[in-house]
Amino acid sequence: MTRILILSFVCFFVASSFAAMTPPDSTATIAQKTAAGYMIEEGKALFNSGRYRDALNKFRDAAKKDVTSAKATLWISRCHYELSNYGYALRYAEDARLLSGISQEKELYEMLAEANHRLGNLDSAIANYEKGIQVMPKKRAADLELPLHLEQAKYAKEQLAKGIKNTRIHLNGDVNSGYNDYSPVIYNGGNSMYFTSRRNNTTGGRQNPSDQQFFEDIYQAKWNSATNQWDSVTNRIGKINGEGFESISYVSEDGLVAYVTMNYSEAMETKFTTKSSDIAEVKWTKQDRWSAPRLLGKNINSSFYDGNATLTADGQTMYFVSERNANKKKSDIYVAYKTGNDWGSAVALPAEINSKGRETTPYITPDGRYLFFSSNGHKNSLGGYDVYVVECTGGKSWGPVKNLGPAINTVNDDFGFKIYDATGKAYINGMEVIGDKASLDIYEFNLRLADLIKSLD
């Protein structure tokens, strides 16, 4: 009798809880589920095209239409993850688990693992990676890179257990804006900085229809020794910024030559267009302003993404990122050498450096000895993109690739690392996590090259 009463109470509670959201007419419920299903498919199409905010709204509508849909809730979680809202991603993944009883939505384990990983909950991340690998088809788990991410979470746990403190310093002043700010380049003895931002005063005021963020512009900042911070931030720097995307990756120490990455579509009313993202050179003129960008030739620029150029001090060697081999791999680092006034053919760096994942933001020390870069494809990673260094031991020979460790890297994306020995400073792009959201910001280290290399031995 007691058991019957308990069952009756449970049934009454469940019925009461869903009474407000579930119409009594079963036909209407089926119609709602069908409508939600269509919305989910529309949302997936938006998601796959990179329009995460539009997709998020579509999945929210689907979840309102069918409040029992674990699938809609899981897709909401995925959108938040792609938008760097890791706290929200975890919350919605947990909600989806409650709705589905997990067996129906096995890919929930991926989002539970990834969100926990980004938030530094490594034990939960490891457990969910392992469960996802166990219950998913082997190929699907491999496509989602769960085995690789599991190894990275374990590596992160091992490294962080050493108690090494991350020494990055969040830049004060107007450089970090609340929008995505990244790619700092220092010159003029450490007194001037160029960086890239997607803040709302971008030239032309355009927004990318895919991610609904403002187009990239290049900004300049000056070091204020009186206030000990960067200020005088402006994107009014002449002909470099225009209607498209512009990002800076290299400025010569004398400030006379710079390399930028540009993306200008045929739809824009500009003097030139790019095939995709292309690398261009600009020079400081006698009129004290930057020249119009000059796109590099076919040995450097392809019909795929090409960008993030970095040069040795003599200007004779360039490393950059390209997706020209994207049919086999993702983005790789290439090297090219100056031949006269032009660049020779670009050659991909060896597989020890270029993983099966993505490599990005290379930085070569002025003497050409040490190459820093970021990658999300190496097993010895704390998670996301980590910064690595490799020594050029002569010609085309390279030493072992080394992770810079938890003093530099975090469980989130870390990239754009540059070190300036003359000033004893290094800079990096990293995620500033506040509550459930995160954005890219610029950080500084008090660091010299010799000390950093010694710490990795």
Image (spheres, helix red, strand yellow):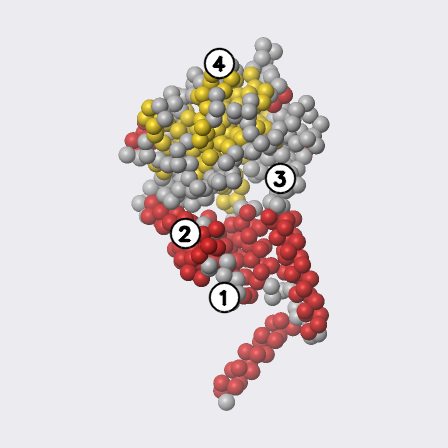
Q: CA distance from mark 2 to mark 3?
A: 32 Å
Q: Is residue 67 above or below residue 453?
A: below
Q: Which amino acid type corresponds to the residue marked 2 in the rendered image?
A: Pro
Q: CA distance from mark 4 to mark 2?
A: 47 Å
First in sequence, mark 2 or 1: give its number: 1
Q: Is residue 39 above or below residue 271?
A: below
First in sequence, mark 1 or 4: give its number: 1
**For mark 4, what is the residue?**
340
Q: Is residue 278 left or right of residue 362?
A: right
Q: Which mark is residue 103?
A: 1
Q: Which amino acid type corresponds to the residue marked 4 in the rendered image?
A: Gly
Tell me where residue 324 appears, x and y as whole percent: 52, 34
**For mark 2, what is the residue?**
147
Q: Which amino acid type corresponds to the residue marked 3 in the rendered image?
A: Gln
- Please report the residue visible at 70 percent of the width from the left and 32 percent of the height from the top: 267
- Please report the residue visible at 52 percent of the width from the left and 44 percent of the height from the top: 438
First in sequence, mark 2 or 3: give its number: 2
Q: Which amino acid type corresponds to the residue marked 1 in the rendered image?
A: Ser
**For mark 3, what is the residue?**
213
Tag 2–tag 3 contact (CB < 8 Å): no
Q: CA distance from mark 1 to mark 3?
A: 36 Å
Q: Residues within 10 Å of mark 3 (few under 14, many from 20)?
A: some
First in sequence, mark 3 or 4: give its number: 3
Give the image quarter of residue 25: bottom right
